[in-house]
Amino acid sequence: MVQDEKKPSPEASQDLVILGITLATADDLADSIEESYKKTAVYTLSERLHNIAAMSPIPKLKTMNWRHWHESVQTLLSLSQTSAVFQKNPPSNRAIKLWSIWWSSKLRETAPHIQSAPSDNARDILKEIIIDSQAQIVTSVLNVTARFWNYKPGNNITSYSYIKEFQKRLHELREHTNISSDVKIQAKNLLLYHINTKWPDLMSRCKNLSLEQTLSECLSGTSADRPSNKNKNKSVIKCNFCNNLGHSIDECRKKQKSEKNKNKNSSGSKILSVNKPTETSCYQLDTAADFHVCGNEDDFSSYFKSSQLIGVAGGGQVTTDGHGDMFLPTSDSKLEILNGAIHLSGENTHILSTSQLEKQGFSIYWPSNYQDIELLRPDGTTCAYFRREAGKLLWKPKHVETVKPSMQRSQNWL
């Protein structure tokens, strides 16, 4: 065996970077080169690759998941020790040939929209994927940026509706790019400019506040402008039960008939399948649920007994014991009150509906590792951290202390 053939090239002493995207460290690359020279049977190499890929799959590449896709490729390259195949001048041996064929197939499988020639090797295909994805990312950032900075209140918009839409676009901008302190100052000035134009009384309150404090103060100061069902024209009121225009859910005849006959479907609403975990102070985030779910009546800030059939995942139904507003213990030792909760006796997990949270002005921030997420208040501050455990997003506060208020308040939320 010739010793020079195994000597790593100068390229192997650096991180593996293609078009500015890092795929492997120099150490991983050196390990891969060494692994490629081992006398391992082709069948064993193939089986090893398939087994590792099954444990660490690469998702289908879409417009909004480049970061997750990139991290998955990095992980698989590291675990399988195959990064050497993406060098400009990889070693010429049997393992490299097999890895090249396997990675070419895997890249085409996970990014089927990318055009490549049959003769393209794994590195060429990956370069096309990077070029296309980075172009889409730039386009998305430009669109979101323009959508934020070009937004201004219309003639008929209320101050509350304008600020809520401004906040929504700000969160969207945060998800696509980093917001520096200078950008925050500019965003605050933009907000105050439009506020001063249409609602000058708010301007003086917010001059010395941060962007987040300004949003909170503005939302508080304009809460009287918040649309209510009582002020809406009957022609634009939409029933959340039957989805027909002209009446609210309290006036819905179909709902009234449904409550008389429990065997009929009362709505198309869905909640997470009822389960009974052992952790009673666990809060699970669910994107499919239409309502928050709580099994303990003491966890409600306001509570009204009611009985209604609710559809669950899988096609079954359960009957609620009541509804109201529930407490959410936060990471900063406060209590948030969440609207739109139903009571199901025996349900130990508190299920949080993302749709109900968004209605109340909360938003979700996904960090780069896609493992843990943050629940943000309307003012942009963090109120809970959800960890991914066994495929579920869970928040487990250290202390859960709720105080039942003496006065209950009615609220239409269904």
Image (cartoon, helix red, strand yellow):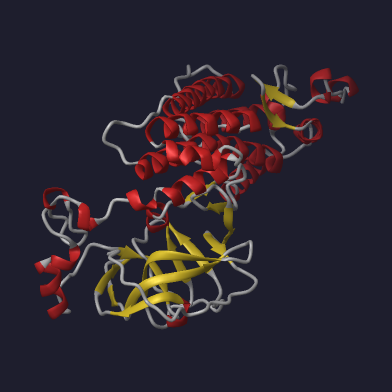
Place of residue 187 in the rendered image (x, y in percent of width and height, measured from the top left): 53, 31
Left or right, 231 with respect to 83, comes to left
Pick the front one: 355 or 208: 208
- Quarter assignment of residue 315: bottom left
Place of residue 42 in the rendered image (x, y in percent of width and height, measured from the top left): 66, 37
Image point (44%, 32%), residue name: 196
Place of residue 245 in the rendered image (x, y in percent of width and height, measured from the top left): 12, 52
Which image quarter is the N terminus in?
Answer: top right
Image point (57%, 52%), residue name: 374
Q: Would you place residue 72 above or below residue 402 in this image?
A: above
The answer to whether residue 94 is seen in the rendering is: no
Place of residue 278 in the rendered image (x, y in percent of width and height, measured from the top left): 55, 79
The answer to whether residue 231 is seen in the rendering is: yes
- Quarter assignment of residue 270: bottom left
Image point (53%, 59%), residue name: 393
Pick the front one: 356 or 208: 208
